[in-house]
Amino acid sequence: MSNETLGIIGGTGWLGGSIAQAVLAKALLPAGKLVISNRSGSHPLAQQGVCLVTDNQALVNRSDVVIIAVRPEHFTNLNINATGKTVISLMAGITAQVIAVQTKASVVVRAMPNAAVEIGQSFTPWYCFGEVGATTRSFVQRLFECVGTAAEVQAEDFIDYLSALSGTGPAFPALLMTALANQAMVAGIPADIAQLAAKNVVVNSSQLLSSRDAQQVIDALVAYQGVTAAALQAMTQGHFEEQVGKALQAGAAVAREGLQVG
Ligand SMILES: NC(=O)c1ccc[n+]([C@@H]2O[C@H](COP(=O)([O-])OP(=O)(O)OC[C@H]3O[C@@H](n4cnc5c(N)ncnc54)[C@H](OP(=O)(O)O)[C@@H]3O)[C@@H](O)[C@H]2O)c1
């Protein structure tokens, strides 16, 4: 268990709330070392011994480490002074430099989890802005391991690029699942069967990939020279990978362009 007091601004939202619940469930911190804030001042977490406040500066004053988990457009009006504190931002598209200037934090970390924090299955890349000590790095890694896997990256731009990749969480699988089901229905498969089949491919069959190398799975199935090979070949000829590349670059461009604050 860590000694730090953790404050989560926006600690009742999708990401902030999931992280708050996970640090308690994984016993990273006791409830008494967790402070969360939102504007309404109410949330069931407050019944678990967590301190819930509406005053963000009060949260910062009580905390050693402050997570900013509000939406980017709400950052401008936060008005916190985090001098001497470590600030971890989950916000897409706001640079560490802007966060450091606006919050006066001594240490800024940018992290990019995804919606699967809710089920402990996020991948969270994180980046340290400036000199950050080993103790803080270790805490950040353990913090995000409470909601899945995590890894430090060495360039801030990787966070912007990965916002469009792992940051999108279930979005690409959802798009694929919808396309598979829609196309099956177009081909005359009943809707309920089409949806079961598509869900199986994306959610269930894909579990095999947790223990097998993806390229080896592709090679093995293509080697049959049958149905799967024909289907995947059609995807490849349709420039599937180039389309994925364009999608990632489009998302990353928005993250790099960022939210204009100030
Ligand atoms: N969702 C994702 O998949 C995802 C993925 C990667 C990164 N992110 C980043 O994570 C951040 C949070 O996203 P989210 O989806 O968790 O958003 P969300 O569900 O809307 O949560 C935002 C939280 O912030 C609170 N809030 C808003 N203004 C506040 C203020 N001034 N002071 C204190 N609390 C305030 C809101 O509560 P009240 O309305 O009660 O104040 C709400 O609980 C965003 O910056 C986003 O870029 C999200």
Image (tube, rainbow, N blue to C red):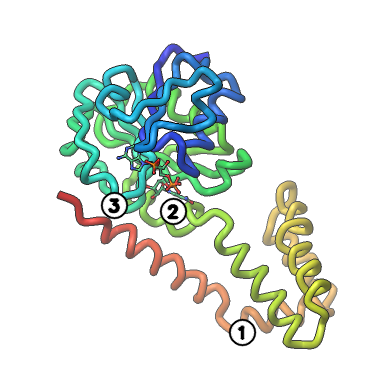
Helix, strand or loop at label 2? It is helix
**Relative to 234, does residue 99 appear above or below in the rendering?**
above
Q: Does residue 96 lie above or below 220 as drawn? A: above
CA separation in Å, label 1 and label 3 = 41 Å
Looking at the rendered image, the disc whose residue lies closer to the viewer, 3 or 2, is 3
Please tell me in which quadrant of the rendered image residue 152 appears.
top left
Q: Which residue is mark 3?
A: 73
Give the crowd class for mark 2: few <14, some 14-19, many >=20 residues within 10 Å: many
Which type of secondary structure does the marked residue at label 3 adopt? helix
> What residue sits 50% from the left and 30% below the top?
20
Q: Residue at x 36, y 54 (%)?
A: 160
Relative placement, left or right, of 243 versus 132 is right
Q: Of label 3 and label 2, which has the lower sequence position?
A: 3
Q: CA distance from mark 3 to mark 2?
A: 20 Å
Q: Earlier in the sequence, mark 1 or mark 2?
A: 2
Where residue 237 is drawn, which disc sits there? 1
Q: Position of residue 167 (x, y in %)?
A: 47, 52
CA gap between label 1 and label 2 equals: 26 Å
Report whether residue 227 is seen: yes
